[in-house]
């Protein structure tokens, strides 16, 4: 009997010890699982904060690049110099619409506002608030805006200032941003908390915590786990934060703890199987986190067409915009070198460098220096590109290519540039373009030994037609005369309308004898020309002033004055003839 009692006592002791060992092991294993999940959420919040910072900095850098390109626009500089508020406003509206800016303000060098454009809701910073922020953070209508100020200058001469603003706390954008970051973001500016989610109403940490430290938060809506991080943008610093419901943490923690408890009660082998499953789950989560990181960078990029590549520049993802643009599915272009699928050239058709290789080599974003052309099989599209690196464990694993279609902006810019240098009625280069061409030719002549010639043309008896038949008939006469002149000139000669019935011709590479023949041919063309208006025939003529140009010619103003003087002598001598400077009879 005592033997049986001893056996029972021993079994009881062993059972007790095993039960105690089971409890201790279960406690330490449960604590390990909790710590792993705690660490997982720390990494998750840290990664999401880094992504949020990338989004804000990318938005700021994109705005800076857009404003920098805008202040180099010759049309905008001319508008500021001339005080042309309407033209400046048109350029600002086009830039805001194409670059995604919420507000753009333009002031002259004295600080007077020339033009402003904001989003329709009226909540963007006004000009005073924008310029006061001085390229940092501005708060307006309960929202946080990134601002930047650029100088508008021609050479060393300051013409004015340009201020842009982009909203980074969108009223309706919390749901999309929360889905990307897998949490509820917020910002603290100058001690004030800006919420992007109503669930954060009255949220505050339950204990003091340093930046980058996981802290419990409490609000009217419940409890959260949160982390904050400082971020410098422009000249200011703000604090960004992210909260996730603590219930998510508890729910994620409950399942493995139950599985662990069941595995200890059932058998040790099942526990090993559960641990192995958790290890595999951890590996899967890490792979999914890397894929999510790539997706986050892609989603945070601003543009219509998005492509991701591997570290060798081969395409592994293209969004629907790219597939529609190419008329191809993802499976058809996946694995191909990006430059073969999306060839980029400059405006003249020349090949560009490889921005993807540059981005991978430098591990930093690369942006297009200006507008480039996407050369598709049957047409070209004006775009601006951004190439950003995808970093995994501080190593570049691929890139994100964003192509932003700027066709409308490009067409508007070309139209404005054409109008600035051409006559609306005849389509010929105007006085400004003609003066630039003459000045350039004088500079070339000073570097060589060739000669050229300059003609000033003034129509004879044009005023009689204009006064008796009306301006519409006069405009038609000018167009017909321009066609006659063009037929008598060489391919490289430049014909321009200087104003009214005055024209200029630059005869590149023409000596005195050749220039004389061309000038006399122009006179003869109009001698035999009859302008028909309502059955009446009107005769017009032309007086021509001729000036030869060589390395010893004076400056632009001097040669223009000399050619004009020769033309005046031609009219004074009886019209319909050519006079050369210095004055000498011709024909």
Image (cartoon, grey):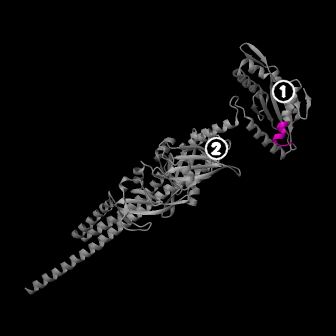
The residue beneath circle 1 is 543
* Image quadrant where one finds the C terminus: top right
SS of the residue under disc 2: helix
In this rendered view, identify the residue nearer to me: 100 or 296. Answer: 100
In this rendered view, identify the residue nearer to me: 463 or 458. Answer: 463
For the image shown, how many numbered marks are present on the structure? 2
Q: Is residue 556 magenta?
A: yes
- Looking at the image, tell me whether mark 1 or mark 2 is earlier in sequence order: 2
In this rendered view, identify the residue nearer to me: 47 or 330. Answer: 47
Answer with the quarter of the image where residue 565 lies. Answer: top right
Q: Residue furthest right?
A: 584
Q: What's the mark number on residue 76?
A: 2
Q: Position of residue 314 (x, y in %)?
A: 52, 53
Answer with the quarter of the image where residue 187 lies. Answer: bottom left
Q: Is residue 202 above or below residue 442?
A: below
Q: Which residues are magenta?
A: 553-561
Left/right of residue 552 with respect to residue 369 in the rendered view: right
Characterize the local packing of mark 1: few (<14), some (14-19) or many (20 or more) Cα atoms within 10 angstroms. Answer: many
Mark 1, mark 2: which one is toward the viewer?
Answer: 2
Q: Position of residue 549 (x, y in %)?
A: 85, 39
Tell me if I can see residue 387 in this picture. no
Q: Is residue 219 above or below residue 7?
A: above
């Amino acid at each position: 009997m005592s033997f049986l009692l001893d056996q029972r006592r021993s079994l009881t002791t062993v059972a007790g010890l095993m039960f105690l060992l089971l409890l201790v092991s279960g406690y330490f294993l449960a604590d390990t699982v909790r710590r792993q999940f705690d660490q997982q959420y720390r990494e998750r919040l840290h990664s999401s904060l880094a992504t949020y910072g990338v989004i804000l900095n990318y938005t700021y850098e994109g705005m800076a690049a857009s404003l920098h390109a805008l202040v180099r626009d010759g049309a905008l500089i001319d508008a500021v110099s001339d005080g042309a508020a309407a033209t400046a406003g048109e350029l600002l509206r086009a830039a805001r619409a194409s670059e995604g800016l919420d507000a753009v303000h333009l002031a002259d060098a004295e600080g007077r506002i020339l033009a402003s454009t904001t989003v329709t809701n009226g909540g963007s910073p006004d000009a005073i608030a924008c310029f006061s922020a001085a390229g940092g953070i501005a708060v307006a209508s309960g929202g946080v805006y990134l601002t930047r100020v650029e100088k508008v200058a021609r050479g060393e001469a300051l013409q004015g200032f340009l201020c842009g603003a982009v909203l980074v706390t969108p009223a309706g954008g919390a749901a999309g941003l929360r889905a990307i970051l897998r949490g509820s973001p917020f910002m603290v500016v100058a001690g004030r908390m800006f919420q992007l989610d109503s669930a954060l109403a009255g949220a505050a940490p339950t204990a003091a915590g340093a930046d980058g430290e996981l802290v419990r938060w409490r609000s009217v809506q419940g409890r959260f786990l949160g982390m904050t991080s400082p971020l410098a943008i422009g000249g200011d610093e703000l604090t960004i934060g992210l909260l996730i419901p603590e219930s998510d943490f508890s729910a994620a923690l409950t399942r493995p703890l139950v599985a662990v408890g069941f595995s200890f009660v059932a058998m040790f082998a099942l526990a090993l199987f559960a641990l192995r499953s958790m290890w595999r789950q951890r590996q899967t989560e890490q792979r999914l986190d890397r894929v999510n990181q790539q997706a986050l960078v892609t989603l945070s990029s601003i543009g219509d067409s998005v492509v991701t590549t591997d570290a060798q520049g081969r395409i592994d993802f293209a969004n629907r915009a790219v597939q529609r643009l190419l008329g191809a599915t993802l499976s058809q272009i996946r694995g191909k070198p990006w430059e073969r699928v999306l060839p980029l050239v400059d405006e003249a058709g020349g090949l560009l460098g490889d921005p993807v290789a540059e981005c991978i080599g430098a591990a930093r974003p690369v942006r297009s220096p200006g507008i480039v052309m996407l050369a598709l099989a049957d047409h070209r599209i004006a775009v601006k590109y951004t190439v950003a690196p995808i970093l995994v464990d501080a190593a570049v694993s691929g890139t994100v290519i964003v192509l932003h279609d700027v066709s409308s902006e490009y067409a508007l810019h070309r139209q404005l540039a054409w109008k600035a240098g051409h006559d609306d009625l005849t389509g010929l280069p105007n006085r400004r373009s003609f003066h630039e061409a003459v000045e350039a030719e004088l500079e070339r002549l000073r570097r060589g030994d060739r000669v050229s010639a300059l003609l000033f043309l003034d129509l004879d008896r044009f005023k009689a037609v204009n006064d008796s038949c009306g301006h519409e008939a006069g405009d038609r006469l000018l167009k017909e005369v321009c066609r006659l002149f063009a037929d008598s000139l060489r391919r490289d000669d430049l014909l321009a309308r200087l104003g009214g019935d005055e024209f200029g011709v630059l005869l590149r590479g023409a000596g005195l004898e050749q220039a004389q023949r061309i000038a006399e041919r122009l006179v003869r063309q109009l001698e035999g020309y009859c302008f028909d208006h309502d059955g009446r025939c009107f005769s017009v003529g032309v007086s021509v002033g001729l000036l030869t140009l060589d390395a010893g010619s004076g400056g632009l103003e001097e040669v223009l004055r000399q050619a004009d003087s020769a033309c005046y002598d031609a009219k004074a001598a009886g019209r319909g003839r050519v006079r050369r400077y210095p004055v000498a009879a011709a024909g």
